[in-house]
Image: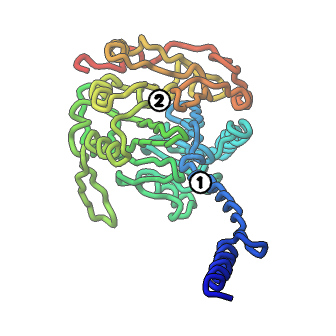
Amino acid sequence: MNNNLKLLALVTTLAAAGLQGCGGGGNSTVAATPAPAPAPAPAPAPTPAPDPLAAAPARVLMTWFGITNWHYQIGDKGVLLDGEVVNSGSTANPAAVTKAFNALKGSGTGTDARTIDVVLLGHVHPDHSVQLPEWAKQTGKTVYAPPAACTSLVAAGVPASQCVGLKGGEVIKLGDFASVRAVRWVHSVDCNEFSNGTGGPETFGFLFNVTTPTGKVLNWYVSDSGAGGPDLTAPRVVTTSTNGVSTTTTYGSPLANLKAAVKDAGLTGIEMWQGGPESRMVYQARTIVPEFQVKTFMPHHLNSRAAGTQAFSLTYGMHYPYSLDDQPKLKEFLATVGVPQIFPTNYFDAWVYDKDGIKTTPNTAMKAVYGLPAAGPGPGVQLANPRAGALECTYD
């Protein structure tokens, strides 16, 4: 083979080898296309944070049954104020307290059920405190009261540990969403009188605040007695005696004490005031209403005195009606500032207080225990208010 033929053979061989190396031969391979990666699974939806107000009470059930007797049902916690169901004699009447207690417990089920978990007393006087030992014994619950009441309870056989003697400023927790603050207050005075705390019994009011599921805070201040003018702005001077040794203590004024309680509760004012009007209510209202931007007034301390020959009796029904005209100055003042009065027509009238305000609610079962009609006064015949015309003074 000559040189030209050798060169041609070499070129042909190299060309064939090159074709195979580029995949052009029968033995060539082609890389498979990789399958697409699976799409990532969607992230799970975040778990909603638990509603911190889910267990908050949506409403308060308020029941009035004479004088300054109130029952407040706040969720599963019930609070009793005063509870003077007889207003006669000087010793407790167990049967009368049992009847009232059973009426409260048996007044309904579910949202209408009533319990007593805390007992409050505003001051020691026969029309407020005589039945207190029986309420303490029959409920077994802690009593928050002036120290003098605790002394009486111990003498009646109630354990000393069951009564907290108030000084003012105490916070009574009713669970995670409700509390009561004790406010050192002042007892009522007559015309031309002044009290700096030494002339009458130690007296306390109670500021309630309740957070509802919507976040709205329900609040009210209840005072089972009180005075106005300088009596509200003067510091309280209280003298006590222990083993023959007298001790005088000066506390803040009632007005300053209430301001402190409102601030401590995180409030800017008071939605509802339950007070008086046994005496000189306008004297108090002229200070309290504008100072705390009160929205509603609920008068109590009603029917604690006899009308004619008919003494206080829950089975008789309110023996005289509450009339706005009994206190014309109060009527005029509240109308001027746009504060309505909401008041009972008979014992055991009840109201629901919630985010929408306060409205009456039936309480037929409890009224039936005392023979009272489902609505309105009766069964006794109502007489005129024996103190009409004596509840306001010329300079109030």
* Relative to 25, 79 lies left or right: left
Tag count in the figure?
A: 2
- Furthest residue in direction right, as rendered: 26
* Relative to 61, 184 lies left or right: left
Name the residue nearer the viewer: 308 or 313: 313
Residue 243 image position (x, y, % from top left): 33, 67
Q: Which residue is mark 1?
A: 46
Q: Which residue is mark 2?
A: 301
* Relative to 222, 263 lies left or right: left
Q: Is residue 141 visible?
A: yes
Name the residue nearer the viewer: 231 or 350: 350
Q: CA distance from mark 2 to mark 1?
A: 55 Å
Question: Crowding near pointer 2: few (<14 within 10 Å), some, many (20+)?
Answer: many
Q: Does 45 sit above or below residue 13?
A: above
Which residue: 64% across, 83% down? 10
Which residue: 42% across, 25% down? 297
Residue 92 image position (x, y, % from top left): 59, 46
